[in-house]
Image (cartoon, rainbow, N blue to C red):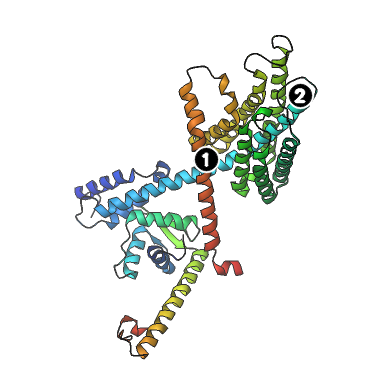
Amino acid sequence: MPIPLREPTFLILTALTTEPLHGYGIVRAVAELSADRVRLQAGTLYGALDRLKDDGWIELDREDVVEGRLRRYYKLTDTGAGVLADETARLRANADAATAGLRARAARGGLSGFGAGPAAGLA
Amino acid sequence: MTVADPASHRLEHAYRRLLRWYPAAYRADREQEMLGTLCEMAQPGQIRPTARERVSLLRGAVRAHVRGAGDGIRGATAAATIPVAALITGYLLAVYALLAFDGMGLTDVVHVGSVWGHLALAVTTALWAGAVVSVLRGHAWWARGLAAGAALAAPFMPGVDAGVGTDAHKAVVIGGLLLLLAPAAALRLDKRERLRAGLVAALVAPVSVAFAVLTVATSVPAHSRRSFAMDLDEQALPIGTALALLVAAGLVFQRTGARGLLTTLLIASATVYLLEPIHDLLPRGSMLAMAVLFGYLPAVALAVVAFTATTMALRHLRRALNRPQGATAA
């Protein structure tokens, strides 16, 4: 997996932080986390799961059969959690830098009107 | 939506057909799971896969094939490393054996004219011998370094007129590359593998020498040292190598099993580099076979080595870049 993580990968790892999930569970969780912006398709999902498993960032938790269908639940490994933590710190640093810059711009009387946007709650 | 519902049944059938694009081994592991996910993701009343689903599955299938081929080639490379290295060891031993018999006037196969030729041969052999000893003693990194050195020195070895074909140079280079690329686990040999590699290495010299001496001894006029019309004795080295190659191929097949096709490709490419001098002996009319063997396989072999090198380098790079900082500090 290349770093910085691509958004679907980042969201899949995030979805698995709370509990082990199966394929459809991951798709739903990712949609929820991204406010329906990222809708994973099955081909993409399993491509990502293969790579994440090869890299040892996720692993198989358990298997279930529901209505005659095989469900495999995946969970985040410690390595995966470490990668996600690093990536989150990197993104946070970027966001902080952007926030500080925009705030300074607003203080200079810039046009952006920083504080009116959705980031206001974070400030 | 239940399984009995005809619409969902049709949809499932369509998904199953799309999943056939994936490699068989992948499907055996993942098909049921993916089918379950696809059916769960389907909209109520949906009777056929959407365009996005089709595109995504097709792309996923292509990726799975590429990954499978990569793993197969890497596996075959790892399996071929030791047999090919043993073969080259045997080849170099045979060159020295033939040189010694040349000195006694029994054959006329190998003669190194210049001091530089002797020097290049000696340097290449010394580096290669170092690589072999390193493998036997379990020092993978030393083996890699020395093999790389041998691969660099090999092009300066005596040329075709000395009886040591340029293909031998290429073979040493290829063998060096294989040692350089092989995962460390492939370089750790157990007792049985050592014995077999030793057998391959020990096979070339006696067979080559026996062939060279016999062709000269039976040539007309007797003992003329110009055997037959085609300088048959000069084929001694390739023939000894060919026999050892058969044994080496057997060893590789034993280690790779199912990945037969890719293994064959690697072995065939090694063969081509080692056996090009022998093509005079092929019957007339086998032009097509020759064209394929000597024209295309080397290119394919180079592509395989390049592919392996690139994917391995990328993999190492990715590992190095992705190592979580917390893990390295701990």
What's the mark number on residue B302? 1
Quarter of the view holding residue B158:
top right
The amino acid beneath tag 1 is Leu
For the residue labelled by badge 1, is the local secondary structure a helix, a strand or a loop?
Answer: helix
What's the mark number on residue B102? 2
* Residue B39 located left or right of residue A21: left
User: Residue placed at 44% from the left, 73% from the top?
Assistant: A91
Q: Mark 2 and mark 1, same subunit?
A: yes
The amino acid beneath tag 2 is Asp
User: Which image quarter holds the C terminus of chain A?
Assistant: bottom left
Q: Is residue B81 above or below residue B212?
A: below
Q: Residues within 10 Å of mark 1 (few under 14, many from 20)?
A: some
Earlier residue among tags 2 and 1: 2
User: Residue placed at 65% from the left, 18% from the top?
Assistant: B231
What's the mark number on residue B119? none
Evaluate whether residue B247 shows in this view.
Answer: yes
